Amino acid sequence: MSYVFNRDTRADMPIVVRGDGIWIEDSTGKRYIDASGGAAVSCLGHSHQRVIDAVREQVGKIAFAHTGAFSSEPAEALAEAVVTSAPGRMAKALFVSGGSEASEAAIKLARQYHVERGEPGRHRIIARRQSYHGNTLGALSASGNMARRALYQPYMQDWSHIAPCYPYRGRSHDETEEEYGLRVADELETEIERVGAETVSAFILEPVVGATLGAVAAVPGYLARVREICDRHGVLLIFDEVMCGMGRTGTLFASEHDGVVADIYTAAKGLGAGYQAIGAVIASEKVYGAIHDGSGFFQHGHTYMGHPVACAAALAVQTAIREEGLLGRVQAGGAKLRTMLEERFGNDAHVGEIRGRGYFLAMELVADRATKQPFDPSLAIHNRVKKAAMDLGLICYPMGGVIDGKSGDHVLVAPPFITSDDELAEIVSRVGQAVDRAIASTR
Ligand code: PMP
């Protein structure tokens, strides 16, 4: 392997050559079900003709023109589509090349909003432990994923991390879900007061946590309380919908489910569905208004922002989601998939919880279901599941390791929106075999 800086861990990595629907094929002819779209990327599956045609057509017309001089038809049409479909009163969108760039831009936009309004002291980001907002330095500073931060600790900003909303492990026996949600939301207010509201720029969170926890949605009331606290202290609210957004949970924006509106949204993975590298930052009228009425210019940019081919691909993805009724399929298919997982794993001694929304579902794997004791991290159960799954011709998204002494291993299942019922059954069967093999391999 010559394109990654790894010595030998990837030496036996298959070489992908083609894909079709939910299937991926490697250079040996082995076929895999793509049951996680990578990391919740390939929402339309592979080789979707509408998107291929849109990309071809745009490359044929004009692939690139610098955004310092030109906008483009696909960028304008995509901005219109995402701004009008986002919750609340959104004003504008900016397109970048992925999720980390989207987080960076959102963090900077929040800062500029405050500076434009005469509050230059507001620079601090508050995020949550066990969160992931990207690997670039600003996004990683916001991320509470300690494993990914450790090496770069000297580069990290002095920002704040509060508890995530993670009822499986956080809720105590004597409180309801709602009480728990309000208790952890109130940690935001405590932290704002501790550091001084006049220093806080924004609170960033994933409405449904993806990679670090495995499809953990906020409990009812949590996001509303967070919104209230942000408003009370003049702090902006950023919803990182890079992984959970763009239809993955059955609504275009995952946070629609909670009926709470952010000041800034980010999106990426499902936005381009893997056909092109693209991320988005969507600014509300409130946030954009401060720039409009102030300097008039967002002090940020990249060469490839608003890339015409990436925008054309994402626009075709949005059109496919709408015209092919895919949100409805995610809702119905997600309910079926959940039932199938519950039937297969409901009594499994090593499955602590099955959770998530739509086609964004996960199982937390535990050594002991009664005590919720995680597996010993040295067993790296998630890696064993991944290996067993690949052997079985299944791509799912196992993640894990104990972070903060709490979270354990989990397996994310995030199939393409076009998955058929038979394919769902095959996915569950293969996930079952992979988990059984992984656990058996520890004995
Ligand atoms: N935010 C979230 C919620 C993510 O899940 C990810 C990627 N896993 C990112 C940001 C970073 O996105 P990218 O890898 O495209 O830079």
Image (cartoon, rainbow, N blue to C red):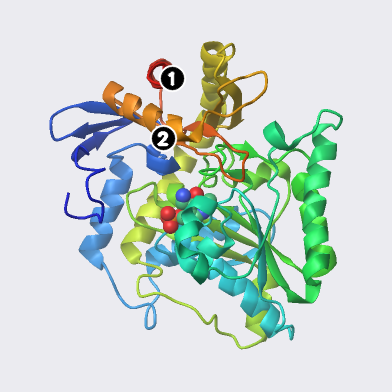
Residue 301, position as x, y percentages in the image: 44, 76
Q: Determine whether 404 is above or below 343 in the image.
A: below
> Which numbered dot is residue 439?
1
Q: What type is the residue that disc 1 sits on?
A: Ile
Observer-nearest residue: 385 or 228? 385
The answer to whether residue 431 is left or right of residue 165 is left
- Corner quadrant of residue 141: bottom right
Q: Secondary structure at mark 2?
A: loop
Residue 419 appearing in the image = yes
Give amino acid for label 2: Ser
Task: Residue 26: name its quadrant.
Answer: top left
At 43% from the left edge and 19% from the top edge, which residue is drawn? Answer: 439
* Vertical side of 137 occupied by 82: above or below: above
- Quarter of the figure with the C terminus: top left
The label on residue 36 is 2
Compared to residue 258, the image places residue 108 above or below, namely below
- Vertical comparison of 366 with 44: above or below: above
Residue 249 at x, y percent in the picture: 57, 37
Q: How far apart are the two marked residues, 2 and 1, measured between alpha carbons?
A: 21 Å
Where is residue 324 shown, x and y percent of the image? Answer: 44, 36
Mark 2 touches mark 1? (CB < 8 Å)? no
- Label 1 crowd (10 A; few <14 / some 14-19 / many >=20): some
Q: Nearer the viewer, mark 2 or mark 1?
A: 1
| 422 relative position to 366: left or right | left
| The residue positioned farthest toward the bottom in the image shown | 295
